[in-house]
Image (cartoon, rainbow, N blue to C red):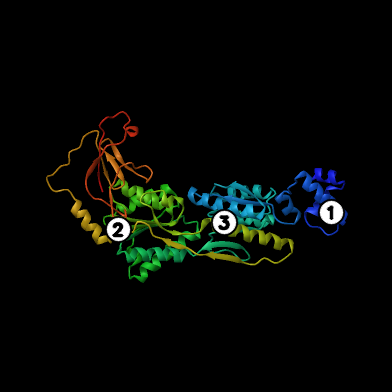
Amino acid sequence: MQDVARAAGVSAMTVSRVVNGGTNVRETTRTAVLAAIAQLNYSPNSAARSLAAGDATQIGLLYSNPSAAYLSQFLIGALAAARRAGCHLVLEACESERPDEQAEATRSFASTSVEGVILPPPLSEAAPVRAELEAAGIPWVSVAMGLPPARSLNVRIDDFEGAAAMTRHLLDLGHRTIGFIRGNPNQTSSAERYRGFAAALEEAGIDIKSVPVEQGYFTFRSGIVAAERLLDRPEPPTAIFASNDDMAAAAVGVAHRRGLHVPQDLSVVGFDDTSLATTVWPELTTVRQPISTMAEEALTLLLARIRAHRSAEADKLEEQVLDHELIVRNPPPRPRARARRRRAAAPQPGVAAARHPTQVRARGACISSASGPPLPLTRRAGRARVTRRGSGDEPDRREGQYRPDQRHRRGRDDRRIAFRI
């Protein structure tokens, strides 16, 4: 801008007025400034123009989410919205669950130049964080908060209805023993998803007290522990509904390790429809919440609130409830058909399967060997050639052998993989 000002023989303030469409500039001066801009190929900085126009240029995003898949989709949406609005997005992690450390991290963040803060879960429900922002006079918007306080901003989906819809789907498939893995108890969405699950079961005449439920924390590790407990029960469930995709993927891994076919022997469903839902094999049936869109809407609401503050307008509760969607992938057979298949596939008495030290038997999406525990497979990891029938949804259930190509022999000339699906 200084170069344009020197070339036009005017001040930088006059150049700014011309660039921003100011009216208190002489026509001859405007013509000279525009000619200098064209000559120097000057492109005004969008952030600087937003600042001059009174718009926010520094929007903070304070995050602490155990699901990397959820957080990555959230950041994609927030960055896209910030780029369109011409503002900068400032990221800050707040990993501690201790209230005093959360408050200290928020005070430090509030002392920077951020003019508003986006709070994705679980920090959207952290009272110390919200209190510090209120004390600093910084507007904030929560995402996926079940019960937002008065005069706040919030973007969410209907977790209750989403969980109820998924439970009805499992009931329609014939399941009557459905295990449930709860989410983190410090989030309202966890309680809402369980409420929806329980309500759908009660609609079907199933006593919720008889339903196997285990506590999870929205992490992959907690999903492993919860799924192990569910499947260790004397009468294990025929389906597991996990409160997010991370825990559902963990349940799939536990099933594979136990030699269970998913979804033929055990149905596993999740919630969120993050990228993880299509990374594991088989892909997850799940409830899609538009995570990226939620982040975009949150930033839009926050910018409007910041402009309202500059106009001395009173705050009011503004909440956007976005649509969710049931995403059905790899629909399983009904539970009775699964039981018949397990009985038919059971080994005959007195017949022992021969095993060679270099031979590995793969059942379903699991590889097991005599030298170690079964290993779960993802879709990308498998190299075995499995012939599929028809449209490819149903695998060919014949035993066969596969000789790996030269790249995967690792020095063994005759390593064989026998698979039975």
Work out whether residue 169 or residue 410 is closer to the camera in this orientation and state it.
410
Q: Are marks 1 and 2 in contact (CB under 8 Å)?
A: no
Work out whether residue 38 or residue 132 is closer to the camera in this orientation and state it.
38
The residue to which callout 2 is attached is 238
Q: Which quadrant of the structure image shows residue 149?
A: bottom right
Q: Earlier in the sequence, mark 1 or mark 2?
A: 1
Mark 1 nearby-residue class (10 Å; few <14, some 14–19, many ≥20): many
Give how far apart the Cα atoms at labels 3 and 2 are: 36 Å
Where does the image place residue 130, in percent across and percent down from the top left?
A: 61, 56
Q: Which quadrant of the structure image shows residue 292?
A: bottom right
Disc 1, SS: helix
Query: On residue 46, which mark appears?
Result: none
The residue to which callout 3 is attached is 295
Where does the image place residue 393, in percent across and percent down from the top left?
A: 32, 55
Look at label 3 and name its amino acid. Ala
Q: Are marks 3 and 2 in contact (CB under 8 Å)?
A: no
Q: Are marks 3 and 1 in contact (CB under 8 Å)?
A: no
The residue to which callout 1 is attached is 30
Look at label 1 and name its amino acid. Arg
Residue shown at 77%/55% (left/top)? Answer: 20
